[in-house]
Amino acid sequence: MKFLLITLITHLPDPVTGRRRSTTERFREVVDTAVLAEELGFDGYGVGERHERPFISSSPPVVLSHIAARTSTIRLFTAVTTLSLLDPVRAYEDYATLDHLSDGRLELIIGKGNGAAQAQLFHVTAEDQWDRNREGYELFRRLWREEKVTWSGTYRPSLTEAETWPRPLQQPIRVWHGSATSRDSVDLAARYGDPIFSANVTNPIEPYAELIRHYRERWSHYGHDPADALVGAGTAGFYVARTSQEAIERYRPIFDARLAAFRRLGVPPVFDTLEDALDRSSILVGSPQQLVDKVLRYHEQFGHEVIHLQADHDGLTDKQHRESLELFQAEVAPVLRREIPSRPFHPPVTAAATA
């Protein structure tokens, strides 16, 4: 199994101390955590894309470019690139550039995005966001693979023998399709033989397991070898300690602050208590053995090879945050790597390999 840390770069007060870092401090924390993730042996680090408060992740290629300069081996993920909002040509230019700056360590997770602000900022609606995502991906995919593209669609001006620069380093790049509930998204992934990344953060396991089963069915429908299907999945929260009692005690105020934030926004929580979330959600809070057991239970339903964990401190001190990540890598990751074989990520591309 492979392990990513992912952040949506929320900009909120600390749920324990109430202090909110400045925007500059928050960005520095994101980059420093990516450096720590590489130091501790995580396989990837992901940066989300949102365009409304409380997120400040509106420009993932910029953030990932800075991370690329501070790291050398860890894979760099987008989580997700919202192609429904972006001009595919401009998105291609940004990410082809980042592909070179990262020595070919880039992995894209694409999706239609969510949030009410996108309708206001980008004039994308719930009615057309899926079609925009599909069209944007199909053009992006061609731009990455073809030196000259002639194309016409609905949501941007047509192209005639268009050239886009720079040409990418990876050919082709692996593109994951992120999905929480959309059969359209997983069907698009299956059609093109791409992997999926299930959000797996809001609801109990059943709807996500059903969506992954649908993906595998469509994968076979499109004529792909079932053994080649690749699935990743998220987790709703993360903290590991030596004992379950210690983990729960430390994580409870973080969880309670999250519930309070949902209620202030008028969003009814799916899990009313931490105990309910531990029982029915993908949250990984507990002892090392409890985390291993839970991931293995989810794997029975998903057959996934990659999971992401929460990258942010989220109410933990720097020391607590580092100790939790260290303990995960020392006692959880080795067991899951052994129990769940996974295909390797591509290594960084060296200058000699491209000469």
Image (spheres, rainbow, N blue to C red):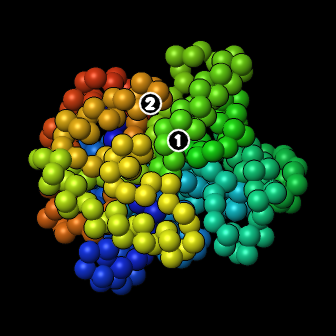
- Along the line of sight, which residue is nearer the eye, 21 or 274? 274
In-front residue for pair 296/280: 280
Instruction: Give 80 or 76, whichever is nearer the viewer.
Output: 80
**Which residue is drawn at the image coordinates 25% and 24% (left, top)?**
338
Q: Amino acid at mark 2?
A: His
Q: Position of residue 162 (x, y in %)?
A: 79, 52
Residue that numbered label 2 is attached to: 304
Q: Position of residue 10 (x, y in %)?
A: 44, 70
In which quadrant of the rendered view does residue 185 lie?
top right
In the rendered image, the quadrant that contains the N terminus is top left
Q: Is residue 54 visible?
A: yes
- From this view, report whether residue 31 is shown above or below residue 194: below
Pointer 1 with pointer 2, Cβ within 8 A: yes
Q: Is residue 219 left or right of residue 68?
A: right
* Residue at the (48%, 29%) spot, across then down: 302
Q: Is residue 340 above or below residue 349?
A: above
Separation of marks 1 and 2 at Cα, in angstroms: 9 Å
Residue under pointer 1: 198
